[in-house]
């Protein structure tokens, strides 16, 4: 793909691109709105542009580069999209409908270089970083598929950077995508509605704290001690829990009055889910006195991961211990497990729940559910 990927250009870059084409600046605004506000995926649909200009754009630039390979629909309404990039790398995006608001979970990398032992994506290794345009395209695709092309999002849809990859190892492109999506004349998804999750890339946690209008932060913890975390999340050997917590304290200074950050704790049966470990976790959080909540995520099993999810009574007992020690704690309900769309299950695999590419509407969900 040699042409310019329009979807990944900031408003200023698009302006420059249009100027170089010898066109007046207002064309840039029309194109930006066409791609991001109206969510059009072909220049030909931008009927406010002269035909001749559309033809030239068609030659020099592209809007959509991701090719949909498969789409899976879970019995709980969750949708997983498996795309291929122009150079054939897998990208996965998950749409999670909820009572109050919907959530789109996007990927920041194809594959992942981190080797968390409980996560299936790790088995792919890092294939490559995604560009800002490829990140934005995932969201545009999921919005169009779920609500209809150009239809305004009916609720305050949230984004989470919790798909494949480590967002903080692709920081510049991630932040650029977030800036593009924040444009009021475009998607207008404000960073406050976006949460990015990191396995603990300490320098980037510190950097995020310095960015005004930044997204919210989640940190995958998975263990209360270095000994266990070294084993489950080898990135811990580079930045220990102590260094991670020091960065959290720094980040805490950037929190808005009612904001908290999140620790994600995947619950692995007989590995990290004992009463003692709950007490250790509470002690850790209380020792550093961080303004954080804990999300307990029952492990989503997938062959050949060597773990089982904790039983619900175990999760509940663990939760109660944290709560009794004053820690804000929530249990996350697994979504889309049956189509390998849940946390830690994204590995470009096929699964049940295939649905035809042309018939994605809310009525389908009702029909199939
Ligand atoms: N690399 C980033 C982004 C991925 S987020 C990070 O580590 O935060 C994915 C979330 O799902 C993380 O909190 C991770 O701990 C969790 N997770 C990974 N594998 C899982 C699994 N098999 N079951 C449940 N949660 C899992």
Image (cartoon, rainbow, N blue to C red):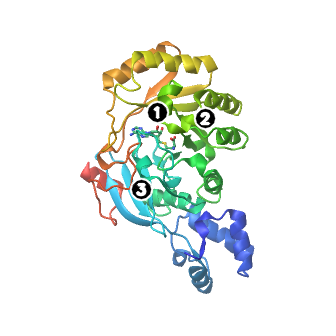
Residue 186 lies, with reference to residue 270, above or below; the image says below
Check residue 265 in the rendering and tell me which mark sits there, or answer none. Answer: none
Which residue is disc 1 drawn over? Answer: 231
Label 3 and label 1: CA atoms lie apart by: 39 Å
Assign a secondary structure to mark 3.
helix
x and y, in percent, of residue 106 in the image: 49, 51
At a point 66% along the width and 32% down the height, the residue shown is 247
Say whether disc 3 or disc 1 marks the residue closer to the N-terminus: 3
Total number of numbered labels?
Answer: 3
Say whether disc 1 or disc 2 marks the residue closer to the N-terminus: 1
Assign a secondary structure to mark 2.
loop
Q: Nearer the viewer, residue 353 or 208?
A: 208
Which residue is disc 3 drawn over? Answer: 146
Determine contact: label 3, label 2, CB under 8 Å. Answer: no
Res 223 visible? no
x and y, in percent, of residue 241 in the image: 58, 28
- Quarter-wise, where is residue 206 in the image? top right
Q: Quadrant of the image for the N terminus?
A: bottom right
Between marks 3 and 2 in the image, the one whose residue lies nearer the viewer? 2
Which residue is disc 2 drawn over? Answer: 239
- Quarter-wise, where is residue 59 in the image? bottom right
Residue 323 lies left or right of residue 8; in this view the side is left
Indicate yes or no: mark 1 CB to ligand 1 under 8 Å: no
At a point 32% along the width and 21% down the height, the residue shown is 313
Residue ranking furthest to the bottom = 52
Residue 230 lies, with reference to residue 366, above or below; the image says above
Say whether disc 3 or disc 2 marks the residue closer to the N-terminus: 3
Label 1 and label 2: CA atoms lie apart by: 13 Å
Q: Nearer the viewer, residue 325 or 369?
A: 325
x and y, in percent, of residue 212 in the image: 72, 43
């Amino acid at each position: 793909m040699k042409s310019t990927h329009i979807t990944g250009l900031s408003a200023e870059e698009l302006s420059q691109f249009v100027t170089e084409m010898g066109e007046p600046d207002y064309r840039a605004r029309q194109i930006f709105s066409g791609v991001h506000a109206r969510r059009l995926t072909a220049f030909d649909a931008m009927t406010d542009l002269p035909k001749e200009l559309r033809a030239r754009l068609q030659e020099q630039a592209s809007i959509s580069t991701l090719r949909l390979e498969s789409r899976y629909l879970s019995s709980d309404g969750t949708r997983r999209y498996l795309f291929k990039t122009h150079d054939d790398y897998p990208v996965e995006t998950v749409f999670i409908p909820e009572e109050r608001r919907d959530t789109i979970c996007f990927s920041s990398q194809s594959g992942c270089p981190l080797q968390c032992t409980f996560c299936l994506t790790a088995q792919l290794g890092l294939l490559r970083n995604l560009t800002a345009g490829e990140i934005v395209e995932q969201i545009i695709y999921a919005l169009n598929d779920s609500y209809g092309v150009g239809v305004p999002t009916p609720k305050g849809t949230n984004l989470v950077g919790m798909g494949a990859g480590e967002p903080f190892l692709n920081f510049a492109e991630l932040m650029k995508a977030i800036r593009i999506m924040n444009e009021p004349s475009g998607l207008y998804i404000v960073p406050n509605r976006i949460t990015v999750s990191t396995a603990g890339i300490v320098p980037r946690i510190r950097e995020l704290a310095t960015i005004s209008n930044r997204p919210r932060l989640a940190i995958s913890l998975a263990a209360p001690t270095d000994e266990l975390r070294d084993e489950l999340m080898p990135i811990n050997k580079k930045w220990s829990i102590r260094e991670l917590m020091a960065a959290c304290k720094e980040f805490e200074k950037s929190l808005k009055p009612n904001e908290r950050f999140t620790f994600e704790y995947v619950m692995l049966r007989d590995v990290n889910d004992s009463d003692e470990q709950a007490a250790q976790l509470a002690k850790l959080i209380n020792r550093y006195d961080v303004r954080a909540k804990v999300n307990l995520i029952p492990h989503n099993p997938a062959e050949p991961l060597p773990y089982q999810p904790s039983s619900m009574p175990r999760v509940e007992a663990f939760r109660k211990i944290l709560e009794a020690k004053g820690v804000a704690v929530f249990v996350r309900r697994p979504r889309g497990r049956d189509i390998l769309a849940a946390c830690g299950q994204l590995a470009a695999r096929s699964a049940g729940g295939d649905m035809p590419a042309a018939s994605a509407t809310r009525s389908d969900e009702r029909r199939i559910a």
